[in-house]
Image (cartoon, rainbow, N blue to C red):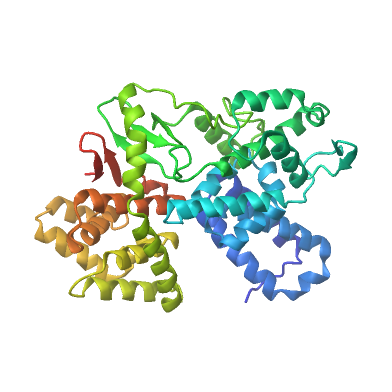
Amino acid sequence: MTDFSLTDYQILEQFRRETDEILVTNNLRDAVNCLTTLQKTMAYDTKIKDYPDILVEYNKILNKLRLVAFASLDWNEALSFLKNNFLVALENKEFIDLTDKIRSKLVTVPTLEERDNYRMRLRRALTQNGERITFKPLKVGDQTQDPTVANWLKLYLGSLGVELVNRVTYQGWLSQEQNIQQLTEEEKERIKYLFEVYEELKLSSVSVEGCEETFVIDEDTDTPLVLYRGKIESALPPQEDIDLLKKIEAVLSGKPVSLSAPTGAPSQPAVISAPIPAVAKPATSAIDRDEIIRKYEGDVKENRSIEDRMTQFTKTTGGKQRELANSLNLLLTGAAPDKLDIIAILYILAKKNAMEDLIKDDDRFYKLVEQDLTRRGGKQQLNDFKMYPTAPQSIRYFLEVLLQHKLRLSEGEAAKWGLHIVNILKKSGNEKYGKIAYFDLEAGDFRWQK
């Protein structure tokens, strides 16, 4: 299977370097590819079991790759990661935000209510984590306990309860809890990060603050706006993101760099229960956040049906891209294409990062878009599509043809489903598709980005 041996220290070092580069660049695609390759190679290269020290190092590499590829793990792997490897996320939080990875994973669940069930399972996994996160034993009454993730969360929940925690209450508890006072500053930051992740998992995906998707909002302002984590804010990158990019460039170039937290990065859990700050047009942010989420979620029964159909199509096709494409083509050429069946297959293809291949390499779908653009007289759009079949606008043409023209959905409904698919693509590592669809405040509905 391979012409190298994992017991070779040079090969180990090569995997280390590649993994570190994947980590600091947060490259999901490369993480998935490297993770798959390494797992297959380790299964094939049985001699590695005779080298326990090397095996430990490869397992460390695997866990780093799992952190970057968290959204692409199956749910059992994701739960296992939080139960057994939270420290990997903690030690690499300079480059990887675990809460963002969790949100990316939850986006792959179509039904917002069902996401809350997964949030509960993720919380439970953390409360079962036996990794030591600080050094001194915890003192709880007359007893001492190991300072594990599980025991710190037990203390936290026992003191502050299972509901969302108010910042004032939280800060008061931090300043008074004796077990925290004995910690070093570094240890305090470690447990604060743990509590931040846990508070994120307490949120409901049905709420504005907990909804995992990012919405581009069309408004008459000089600065583009997005609805993100319950806030309407500027779409321009904040200074801490710019600083982080500079830090990544320095690391990759081999220059010495301080690995302290980015300027402005939060040192404590976000204000979960605090009001959303106003923006340039307060009336918009106050009224439309809930409306946007409500319209985005759509019909709960339809969402659950899509989930069931995704399971069914995955079983009947074996999850194979070619078989999924055949099923999609069969539906589209039928007399009455079923909306939910088509959307279910598109969801699966988006999760598999296979949308580009579908358009670029499968003549049936390439011609479908080409014929539609020709029929509608879109000469410039047709030229763009032929030249750049995997560009964001080409993906938009493809989704518009299938959802709006083939299924005869309204633009609002078609763009809404398109935005669902785009969010899955983004969380699978395709950030370039972020502006395919948006929410139009004036129209009160979703629209394609022209």
Hey, which quadrant is residue 269 in on the image? top right
Residue 15 in view: no
- Residue 6, given in percent of the width and then of the height, sits at 72, 67
Q: Is residue 406 above or below residue 115?
A: below
**Image quarter (top left, top right, bottom left or bottom right) of the C terminus:** top left
The residue under the point 36% across, 52% down is 420
Q: Is 58 on the left-hand or right-hand side of 99?
A: right
Q: Is residue 205 above or below residue 333?
A: above
**Image quarter (top left, top right, bottom left or bottom right) of the N terminus:** bottom right
- Residue 150, given in percent of the width and then of the height, sits at 74, 47
Hey, which quadrant is residue 222 in on the image? top left
The residue under the point 77% across, 28% down is 177
Front-lying residue, 165 or 42: 165
The residue under the point 39% across, 69% down is 309
Front-lying residue, 229 or 428: 229
- Residue 421, given in percent of the width and then of the height, sits at 36, 55
Hey, which quadrant is residue 170 in on the image? top right
Front-lying residue, 262 or 250: 262
Q: Is residue 311 above or below residue 184?
A: below
- Residue 141, given in percent of the width and then of the height, sits at 86, 36
The residue under the point 58% across, 25% down is 263
Residue 211 in view: yes
How many marks are shown on the rendered structure?
0
In the current view of this chain or complex, which residue is farthest to the right? 142
Front-lying residue, 325 or 348: 348
